[in-house]
């Protein structure tokens, strides 16, 4: 059985390093870190970079990994969004899922300010051009200022061109009501066991309480991370490892 992690935007798989280390200390290794195209992985020719493209990419990747049985999958940020897309179409590929950002699926979710700018024609292009124009040190400082670990931020800076290539079509394809519709689709399904990771200080996922509400709708266990921000895996890797290992152990109980 495979254990798969999927990150989001603007990120590479370097965000998982501390958490992977904590899990290794608990006897869990062999974790597969999947990098979405543009976000630490090459962008294929003709890549549309929409949420549907990423959903289909993840389905193909997980199909190849699920030959020995459904996978346990962990998603963060848009990585969680890709996992939600996978679950809406191929829940049979998944033994369990653990994701943050469940607030994005709430019927009243409004995208955060930066996302709304990315979704705005011409404005989004100017912002992305500005991201690419900064020096590497400026890009690292921008990421660490909002909670990303320094090593992960350095990897993001080195991958900025691919990220910039994919941000706008991804966010524009996720403009509401797309995410609310996805939440309704998921709530109508019988899903595999889920863990709703809920860092209380994440500014991108909507008001407090929405992750709890969506966890109830999706039949998932709610896992608060009090005081943690968006990059909880960088800030609280030991606590996150405890939550995940406890969840996975419960599946075999």
Image: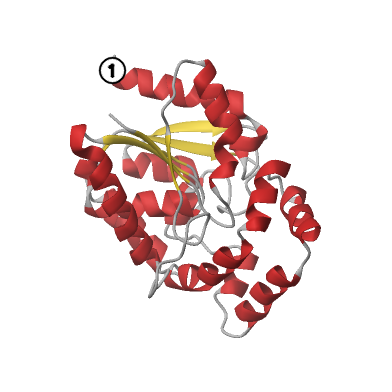
Residue found 60% across the figure and 23% down from its top: 238
Q: Is residue 86 above or below residue 248?
A: below
Q: Position of residue 198 (x, y in %)?
A: 53, 38
Q: Position of residue 137 (x, y in %)?
A: 80, 56
Left or right, 17 with reference to 36 = right
Q: Quadrant of the C terminus?
A: top left
Q: Is residue 26 above or below residue 125?
A: above
Number of marks in the rendered image: 1
Q: Position of residue 130 (x, y in %)?
A: 72, 73
Foreground residue among 252 and 144: 144
Foreground residue among 3 and 106: 3
Left or right, 209 with reference to 37 = right
Q: Is residue 98 above or below residue 245?
A: below
Q: Position of residue 174 (x, y in %)?
A: 44, 67
Q: Quadrant of the N terminus?
A: top left
Residue found 63% across the figure and 30% down from its top: 236
Mark 1: secondary structure: loop
Foreground residue among 204 and 69: 69
Residue 190, quarter of picture = top left
Residue found 49% across the figure and 51% down from its top: 103
Q: Which residue is mark 1?
A: 252
Residue found 33% across the figure and 43% down from its top: 218
Label 1: few (<14), some (14–19) or many (≥20) C-alpha neighbours in 10 Å: few
Would you say residue 56 is visible in this rendering? yes
Would you say residue 175 is visible in this rendering? no
């Amino acid at each position: 059985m495979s254990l798969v992690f999927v990150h989001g935007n603007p990120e590479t798989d370097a965000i998982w390093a501390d958490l992977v280390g904590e899990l290794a200390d608990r006897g869990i290794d062999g974790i597969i870190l999947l990098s979405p195209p543009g976000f630490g992985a090459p962008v294929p020719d003709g890549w549309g970079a929409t949420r549907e493209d990423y959903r289909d990419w993840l389905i193909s990747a997980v199909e190849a990994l699920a030959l020995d049985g459904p996978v346990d999958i962990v998603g963060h940020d848009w990585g969680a969004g890709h996992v939600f897309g996978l679950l809406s179409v191929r829940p049979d590929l998944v033994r369990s899922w653990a994701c943050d950002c469940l607030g994005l699926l709430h019927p009243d979710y409004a995208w955060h300010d930066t996302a709304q700018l990315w979704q705005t024609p011409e404005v989004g292009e100017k912002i992305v051009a500005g991201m690419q124009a900064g020096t590497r040190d400026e890009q690292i400082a921008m990421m660490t200022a909002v909670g990303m670990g320094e090593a992960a931020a350095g990897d993001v800076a080195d991958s900025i061109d691919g990220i910039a290539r994919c941000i706008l079509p991804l966010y524009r394809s996720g403009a509401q009501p797309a995410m609310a519709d996805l939440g309704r689709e998921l709530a109508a399904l019988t899903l595999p066991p889920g863990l709703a990771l809920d860092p209380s200080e994440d500014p991108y996922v909507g008001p407090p309480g929405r992750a709890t509400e969506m966890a109830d709708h999706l039949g998932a266990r709610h896992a608060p991370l009090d005081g943690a921000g968006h990059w909880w895996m960088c800030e609280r890797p030991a606590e996150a490892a405890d939550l995940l290992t406890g969840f996975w152990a419960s599946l075999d109980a």
